[in-house]
Amino acid sequence: MATEMAIATKAPATIAPIERLASDVSRCSRSGSLYRGVFSVETRITLLALEPSDLLRLMSTSAPNDNTHTSSARTVTPGTEAAKEVDMNAGMNDDNGITMNTSVPLPPPGLQIAIDTENPYSANNKEHRRLWWALPLLTLGWVSLIAVIASSLISVRLWELAPGSVEQVASRLSFDKKALSQVTRYPAESSVMFVTAYGGQLTALDALVGALDPDVDVQTFKERFGESTPGVQQQIGFQSMTSAKQIAEYVAYTRLGLEASFTLGAIVVNELVCLETAVALSACKQLGVGDTITALNGEPTETLAELAPLMAVKKEGEIVTLTVIPHKSSTSIERRVQLIVSPDDPDRVIIGFVPADTRTVDLPFEVGIDTDQIGGPSAGLAFTLALLDELTPGDLMGGKKVVATGTISEDETVGAIGALQQKAVAVKAIGADVFIIPASQSDEEIAAARRAAGSKVKVIPVNDLAEALAALESLGGSGLTNATISL
């Protein structure tokens, strides 16, 4: 007893409870070799701080059983332990804050195992409770990542109309030697720009993101292509762009007093007219977009000029036989079609399709307009303004950053286009000053374009080329008053 009391008086003033001892031993057994040594020292000190009765009770209740493991601690007898003293005035150590001058034994082997098996999740073993959510959270993270990757790779039958790009027309113009030998080119100081909308097929992830974006119009296959197909629509889009360039050249040249004329082309189906009362013999059931019509009831119809007089004497409901070359085919077939009344003109009987503009323009010289892989006719007005600006001195844009959109007809009429709101978003993004649009757009479309373009962009609806030129002149442009070219 005297020996035990001597040891106790050299121990720290604070006496650790038995529960703390059990926790320390448990932590020591699970940690690495460094911490095993650290907490062994702490445990040995704590054992010495126990009252004799507590020490005996702890040892008696911690006897090893069949499930315990043999401790690697060396054996120390009570006699040996009583002969040693602990120097509590030792210096500090980076590992545990205490440096011992003499060795103190580990607790009996049975104590450590009993604590591990009976109370492995004690109050001081919080790391177990901290990590219980790690596995499900990690699993959820991997599943989410795989889902996102898969949805970004899987295409769905949905298409988008989204804001596209804005580009200068002047950088796409090219004058060949013949052109430069006849006219003078005046490089534009601030060239008019045209704007596009993007319309690709969507992945599952894109469809979700697009549905949440107010500036993106997500369309079904039917809404996007109608009775056509993506391949046919692309081909027609490129043809429309070619026509837009040719008409722009025709309008610009005739505006400047140059000779220009059109030559009619083949009759190609650009769009089908399908009424609610469509029957099996309706054109929308018998023809396809991209088909070429070469004859009506055996009469050759190489151009619309030959088809028009034949249709003038036909009546609603009459069935005619058309000779057709299907899209991507070189073989003619015959189709029987029932004629209908035009939904736009009750006094006119039609077959039931809208023809593509396949005309070619005859010009005194050619100016190339590189449109790369851009389709559609909506850049017609911008092309016309750019040609007029390059062929005349001065600055039509008046130093302003001008974007124009709209089709152009040979009579200088500016026609409506699609995706106006999406194009307005792109116009705002490049910091344009002016956005010229067709006045023939609906009131709702014009209002949406104004909202999308923002207050800093002046949106100007025009009906024809003359109104567009007048608007630019009012904003500081040089105008085209009496501008002509003599060859």
Image (tube, rainbow, N blue to C red):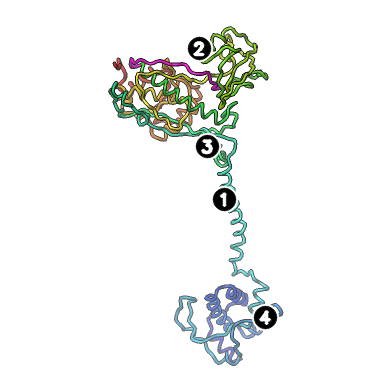
Q: Earlier in the sequence, mark 1 or mark 2?
A: 1
Helix, strand or loop at label 1? It is helix
Label pair 4/2, CB-CB below 8 angstroms: no
Label pair 1/4, CB-CB below 8 angstroms: no
In front: label 1 or label 3: 1
On screen, residue 159 versus residue 460, left or right, reads right
Q: Mark 4: which amino acid?
A: Ser
Image spot of residue 207 (x, y percent) = 56, 38
Q: Earlier in the sequence, mark 1 or mark 4?
A: 4
Examine the rendered structure and indicate whether residue 328 appears above or below residue 362.
Answer: below
Q: Residues within 10 Å of mark 4 (few under 14, many from 20)?
A: some
Task: Looking at the picture, tell me which residue is in the foreground, 128 or 449.
Answer: 449
Mark 1 vs mark 3, CA separation in Å: 22 Å
> Magenta part of the protein: which range?
255-271
Q: Earlier in the sequence, mark 3 or mark 2?
A: 3
The label on residue 371 is none
Label pair 4/3, CB-CB below 8 angstroms: no
Image spot of residue 172 (x, y percent) = 37, 30
Examine the rendered structure and indicate whether residue 430 appears above or below residue 330.
Answer: below
On screen, residue 433 versus residue 64, left or right, reads left
Residue behind mark 2: 305
Residue behind mark 4: 62
Residue furthest out toward the top:
313
Image spot of residue 288 (x, y percent) = 59, 24
Quadrant of the frame with the C terminus:
top left
The label on residue 145 is 1
Mark 4 vs mark 3, CA separation in Å: 68 Å
Residue behind mark 3: 213
**Within the magenta stretch, is there residue 258?**
yes
Examine the rendered structure and indicate whether residue 57 appears above or below residue 240.
Answer: below
